[in-house]
Image (spheres, rainbow, N blue to C red):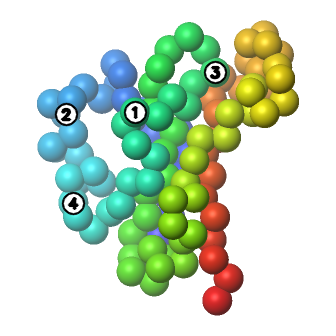
């Protein structure tokens, strides 16, 4: 399984002490590919709301190593904050799958 998108998984939504009670995070069955240190927001906050979580050995082997990333379209396309916010208040997350 592959879960990706806006989890609201940081800042005021999830405090550091909350993580142990969240099985999607605490279970070793799941691998989180976007780190807590990432910033997936366009605005002035610095929060890792958007995540990619994988489950299953076959899927894990199908991922290109170290390819999970936050796509900072504001920087890529040279947008100011107003232009970027007109697109979204979050940056998308991405991962590359290998072809077998």
Q: Secondary structure at mark 4?
A: loop
In-front residue for pair 57/75? 75
Which tag, 2 or 3, sits closer to the chain's start?
2
In-front residue for pair 19/44? 44
Q: Would you call the spot at circle 4 few (<14 residues within 10 Å), some (14-19), or many (20 or more)?
A: few
Q: Position of residue 17 (x, y in %)?
A: 15, 30
Which tag, 1 or 3, sits closer to the chain's start?
1
The residue depicted at 47 percent of the width and 70 percent of the height is 1
Q: Which residue is mark 4?
A: 27
Which tag, 1 or 4, sits closer to the chain's start?
4
Distance CA(mark 1)–CA(mark 3): 15 Å
> Can you tell which of label 1 and label 4 is closer to the viewer?
1
Q: Which residue is mark 2?
A: 18
> Can you tell which of label 1 and label 3 is closer to the viewer?
1
Against 88, residue 94 (above or below) is below
Distance CA(mark 4)–CA(mark 2): 14 Å
- Can residue 86 be seen in the rendering of this structure? no
Q: Which residue is mark 3?
A: 42
Q: Which residue is mark 1?
A: 37
- Can residue 63 be seen in the rendering of this structure? yes
Distance CA(mark 3)–CA(mark 4): 30 Å
Q: Position of residue 68 (x, y in %)?
A: 55, 54
């Amino acid at each position: 399984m592959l879960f990706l998108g806006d989890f609201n998984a940081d800042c005021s939504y999830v405090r550091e002490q909350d993580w142990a009670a969240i099985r999607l995070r605490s279970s070793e069955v799941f691998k989180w590919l976007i780190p807590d240190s990432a910033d997936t927001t366009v605005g002035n906050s610095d929060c890792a709301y958007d995540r990619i979580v994988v489950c299953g050995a076959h899927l894990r082997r199908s991922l290109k190593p170290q390819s999970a990333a936050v796509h900072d379209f504001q920087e890529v396309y040279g947008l100011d904050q107003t232009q970027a916010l007109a697109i979204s208040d979050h940056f998308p997350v991405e991962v590359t799958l290998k072809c077998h």
